[in-house]
Amino acid sequence: MVVATPEQIAQWKQTKKIGIIGLGDMGQLYARKFTESGWKVCACDRESLYEDTKKKFLDTSIEVLRDGHRVSRVSDFIIYSVEAANIKQIVATYGPSTKVNAIVGGQTSCKAPEIEAFETSLPEDVEIITCHSLHGPRVATEGQPLVLIQHRASDESFAFVESLFEDFKSKKVYLTATEHDRITADTQAVTHAAFLSMGVAWMANNQYPWTIPKWIGGIENAKVNISLRIFSNKWHVYAGLAITNPQAHKQILQYATSTTELFKLMIEGRGDELRSRLFAARDFVFGKLEKKHSLLLSDDLLENFSLSKSPPEGSKANSHLSLLGIVDSWFQLGIIPYDHMICSTPLFRIWLGVTEYIFCTPGLLESIVDFVIKDHTFRRDDMEFVIAARSWSDIVHHGDFELYKSTFEKTQNFFKPMFAEANKLGNDMIKTILKKTEQNELENAE
């Protein structure tokens, strides 16, 4: 592996220009981070937004250009930060204008269509090094996974691209495009499906869960905050991963199947079968953890992050179908989530910690099974959740971006009044939880 020297990096900062096509939230994050690190950056958004985009970046040294042709002609490294559904069309439009011997990459969450677009539309002299920051635009880059893929490039060019990201202070992960798509499906597809289904189910029941006593508590705080965090983002971030990644299709279908089958066992009162299935899932997913393993999260830790204005009235029983479905999905698909921790997003680490707490706290899983068989408090909620999970699965299976968008945005509008407060509380929750999980991971590694 070639490592750039400080002298080389200083020279590159003087002579190289970084181009970004697409100035959504992540495009803006990259543009500003590169600029703050001393790189020369030019960028563009849609041509119709040119004048507004120039005004947005007046306080920076970012050079805003009219379109992707102008960015491509002058840049030594071009990053396409566009929606996965549009990557083929946009690369076909601007790719032929790429500067001779430049490097091109992209930020999409699924690399198969991105790589295909590059190989189809870029000149043969252009190198391909692509990337993916496994976190959202409002999460600090420090310590978060950054995937780098040296698809068609020299080692020296790869060293140049690596040097660009030094000030991100991210954890670099080196994968192929195929490995990336499999791992991101394993770590994101099912968890996204769970939170999206929660939001749609709450909307269907006309519920703001933080106002209802049965949804107030530690684990419930994580569900509410993360679901609202997802719905406060752009729909295409999640649609791109789900629809363009074939591995994700399989996982989202399995999640819908798992939640449906577990719900049927609940309403039919088949407690022994439910218990046997969940314990088998627990043993497969968590069975290899050392006895000294510290749980990543606890209900008590999450108690402090509630949107409710009323104090919690102690821990409440819950069916936790969304959590049971996730672990059952991992079991049915043969996925051990701990194998992919190096590529895990903050939300995945939180959700893994929550499922670990439910399945590994002595006696808790048994008590949940007893509760769901005897108590019907959550039947109405769980029915809507199953319907929502199956609906998302159908949308993804048919590759319907427009239906994905309309379903997402309808739910988004329902919860919109709470986004500002939820994101602030969610940021605090994520910082606290990540600090705790990192501490526990160090302890478990010893």
Image (spheres, rainbow, N blue to C red):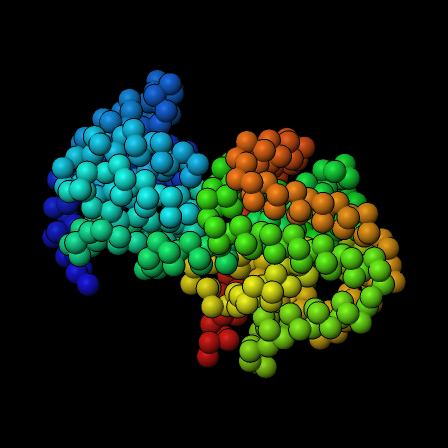
Task: Look at the picture and state if 425 lies above or below 441.
Answer: above
Left or right? Give the position of 53 relative to 121: right
Left or right? Give the position of 422 relative to 67: right
Q: Nearer the viewer, residue 13 or 59?
A: 13
Where, by quadrant of the figure, is residue 31 drawn? top left
Q: Quadrant of the N terminus?
A: bottom left
- Res 253 visible: yes
Q: Nearer the viewer, residue 33 or 155?
A: 155
Q: Nearer the viewer, residue 50 or 382?
A: 382
Q: Residue furthest bottom?
A: 291
- Res 55 visible: no
Q: Nearer the viewer, residue 223 or 343?
A: 343
Where, by quadrant of the figure, is residue 325 drawn? bottom right
Task: Look at the picture and state if 37 lies above or below 417.
Answer: below
Task: Look at the picture and state if 326 lies above or below 199.
Answer: below
Q: x and y percent of residue 136 in the render?
A: 46, 45
Q: x and y percent of residue 56 in the render?
A: 37, 25
Residue at 46 percent of width and 48 percent of height? 245
Residue at 46 percent of width and 76 percent of height? 445
Q: How many marks?
A: 0
Q: x and y percent of residue 379 in the render?
A: 82, 52
